[in-house]
Amino acid sequence: MSNPDHPPAVGVLDQGPELIFPPGFLWGAATAAYQIEGAATEGGRTPSIWDTFSHTEGRVVAGHTGDVACDHYHRMPSDVRLMAELGLKSYRFSVSWPRVQPGGSGPANTEGLDFYRRLVDELLGHGIEPWLTLYHWDLPQPLEDAGGWPARDTAGRFADYAELVADALGDRVTYWTTLNEPWCSAFLGYGSGVHAPGRSDGADAVRAGHHLMLGHGLAVQALRASRPQAQLGITVNLYPVTPASDAPADVDAARRIDALANRFFLDPVLRGSYPTDLAADLREVTDFGHVRDGDLAVISTPLDLVGVNYYSRHVVAAPVEGAEPEPYWRAPSCWPGSEDVRFVTRGVPVTDMNWEIDAPGLTETLRRVHEEYTDLPLYVTENGSAFVDAVIDGQVDDVDRLAYFDAHLRAAHEAISAGVPLRGYFAWSLMDNFEWAWGYTKRFGMVWVDYDSQARIPKSSARWYAEVIRRNGLAAQ
Ligand code: FCB
């Protein structure tokens, strides 16, 4: 055992040194409202696009919905006790917009806000730092009916909602992130349509991406005005994009996908401009006429931190004649202007999502954000893996997930050693939950959830993570 204040000198341990993280490193776990809360029609909550989508036949595997999910709405106090038992320093959750502002406009719903007041109080009472995400994909359905994120007005509605949540929780929540993964909201929601609201139009996806970022900027301004002490940021999902070969056509394919996946969001938010190559790639999709004077200044309103979600790497190549289009996030409709780029499978180990396991990609991603974009503190706001788990004699021995976390934490530590101001890490996810279009068929949790009884069983990875947190680092390898 080591004392985090006094890491062992390099070389004194037979198997190499322990990897100790900086003092105060924020160890957490993450969830999202629609994925865990349930209570879809209780306490004044109205439908979001995910309620409509999941109740539409053929959209979610096996017709699963978030109606009950992990029943967290009713089990919140015991779930927070579980977090405390694991020693979490922070818990990242999202607020359900239609729970606190039914319909997405007008007055707050006190009953909905009270749930989050109680949650935050429970967390603080257990010494757990609340980390609040305002938007994890559950747009109130009436706002979608009025045009959704492709409509400019939605950005303003989001800022109003942010203000309403700040009024209720701003006295006790320090860390705020506006959006979770705007790429997914825009390109899975309005491009390929595999996520709610299930629309498929390249120009709409690009407009949605812009208005999401505009909403982010307006919300940051509103939060800053009402809560000057708050730490404000955004969470983006980033991928290293690697060409399959040095051939110029493959290198160009990587440039295109990097523009759509990463720079589409990083450049406006952190530099106040869209990448010029992106506009050129998209010229047949949109003329960016939806971007108004002043928008980019709002979008690039200064932040206090950046959240990075990391799962995998994209390896891409130029198109070949007759290649089959691939499903899901590789669907051509996710990549307007680059529909013919091929995603290459390298044959390395994958998770149950079929996502390639690539821990060095986390180091690379964090270094890139720091070295190319910003000196702001960074946080890994999600990282984790789905694997097929089994309960045997009341235990879930999820060795693959544990190894995934271990490898990625080593990669995070390497980024810190390279000078990245990484201040925290949130495992995705605290518990198994509703994995969007995959319903309950994919398990990402450190805690097993029995969806019939709602029993929770901490898996081996949860016990291991508790030990990582306790020693503020990893054992020697
Ligand atoms: C991310 C989402 C999160 C979860 C993980 C697996 O894209 O933010 O809600 O579904 O993927």
Image: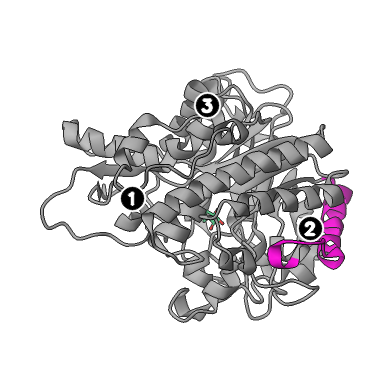
Q: Is residue 278 above or below residue 128?
A: above
**Residue labelled with disc 1:** 336
- In reply to whether residue 176 is colored magenta, the answer given is no
**Residue labelled with disc 2:** 80
User: Is residue 340 found left or right of 428 in the rendered image?
Assistant: left
User: Is residue 216 found left or right of 129 in the rendered image?
Assistant: left
The span from disc 1 to disc 2 (Cα, nearest Å) is 42 Å
Secondary structure mainly formed by the magenta segment: helix
Q: Residues within 10 Å of mark 2 (few under 14, many from 20)?
A: many
Q: Is residue 89 above or below residue 355?
A: above
**Residue labelled with disc 3:** 271
- The reply to whether the residue tagged 1 has its Cβ within 8 angstroms of ligand 1 is no
Mark 1 vs mark 2: in front: 1
Residue type at tag 1: Pro
Question: Which stretch did the figure color magenta?
Answer: 102-127
**Residue 104 location (% of width, % of height):** 70, 62
